[in-house]
Amino acid sequence: MTKLTAEKLSISYDSTSIINNIDLHIPEGKISIIIGSNGCGKSTILRSLARLLKPTQGCIYLNGKDIHQHSSKEVAKQLAILPQSPEAPEDLTVKELCYYGRHPHKGLFARYSTEDHKIVSNALQSTKMEHLSDRTLDALSGGQRQRAWIAMALAQGTDLLLLDEPTTYLDLAHQIEVLELLRNLNKQQNRTIVMVLHDLNQAARYADYLISISNGKIYTEGSPKQVFTEKMIEEVFGLSCKIIDNPVDRSPLCIPTGIYKKNFSK
């Protein structure tokens, strides 16, 4: 299984420091969710883990090797990332999009093999997109389109999947649809999933491992029960709240009670 870690990681844009000297170990075979207030560096961390950003200091290790010593193709064979607002030609079909996921495994002029066709078929089946495989992206609903992109990521054939706010712009029903799909991929296929989420209660419900970010540092990390506390919500998000047990699955549930006056993460 793919191992992903960061040591003494710092990231800056121009002269502005975003992430400051953090260590991070992504648990294998689990769902890890990164939370924090707007602008705290959640997406920056995820993009760095995917080799899309180079650290100012420190190192990210993919299977024990500095990720920047891997070629782009080598990285794409080991991890897949789905950015916030992925783009592709609107007249592209779902199946055609899925085959893009096989490109890291092909030579320049190589044809798709029987194995490629099988992997794409399995990706469409896992995301319940088989019946929509010939439909173009512009003919899909928001939830269907997100599932199509996840199918493409699955077609890369990696056991490590990174997603940056995969529920953005979706209504609540489609948000749950996508999160349940990711949970099933984790439980049934043992895929390691790392994602950034804005909705705190969804993060607490779907995470095995929760990482809260404040002022460019890890405020706390661990199980939702360990991390999702009234103190953390106050200090990281500037929100007073009560934490109760979700009556459905006993995961921690945040009930806001007001704005906390103390300065908090930008």
Image (tube, rainbow, N blue to C red):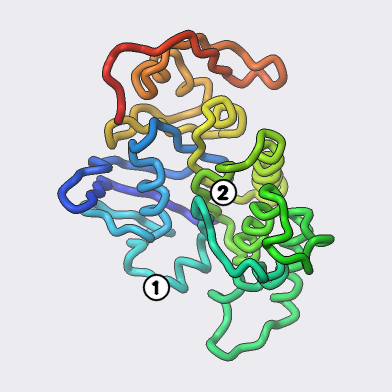
Question: Which is nearer the eye, 190 or 89?
Answer: 89
Rendered image: mark on residue 143:
none
Q: Report the quarter where the C terminus lies.
A: top left
According to the picture, the residue beneath numbered tag 1 turns out to be 71
The disc labelled 1 sits on which kind of residue? Ser
Per the image, label 2 sits on a secondary structure element best described as strand
**Residue shown at 77% from the left, 58% from the top:** 129
Q: Residues within 10 Å of mark 1 (few under 14, many from 20)?
A: few
Image coordinates for residue 173, horizontal then vertical, percent: 71, 35
In space, the residues marked 2 and 1 are separated at their CA atoms by 21 Å
Q: Quadrant of residue 89?
A: bottom right
Q: Is residue 256 above or below residue 174?
A: above
Q: Quadrant of residue 202?
A: top right
Per the image, label 1 sits on a secondary structure element best described as loop
Q: Is residue 246 above or below residue 93?
A: above
Q: Is residue 182 above or below residue 51?
A: above
Residue positioned most to the left: 15
Rendered image: mark on residue 192:
2
The disc labelled 2 sits on which kind of residue? Thr
Task: Specify whether 144 is left or right of 166.
Answer: right
Residue positioned most to the right: 131
Image coordinates for residue 10, horizontal then vertical, percent: 24, 47
Task: Specify whether 109 is left or right of 15.
Answer: right
Image coordinates for residue 233, horizontal then vertical, percent: 42, 19
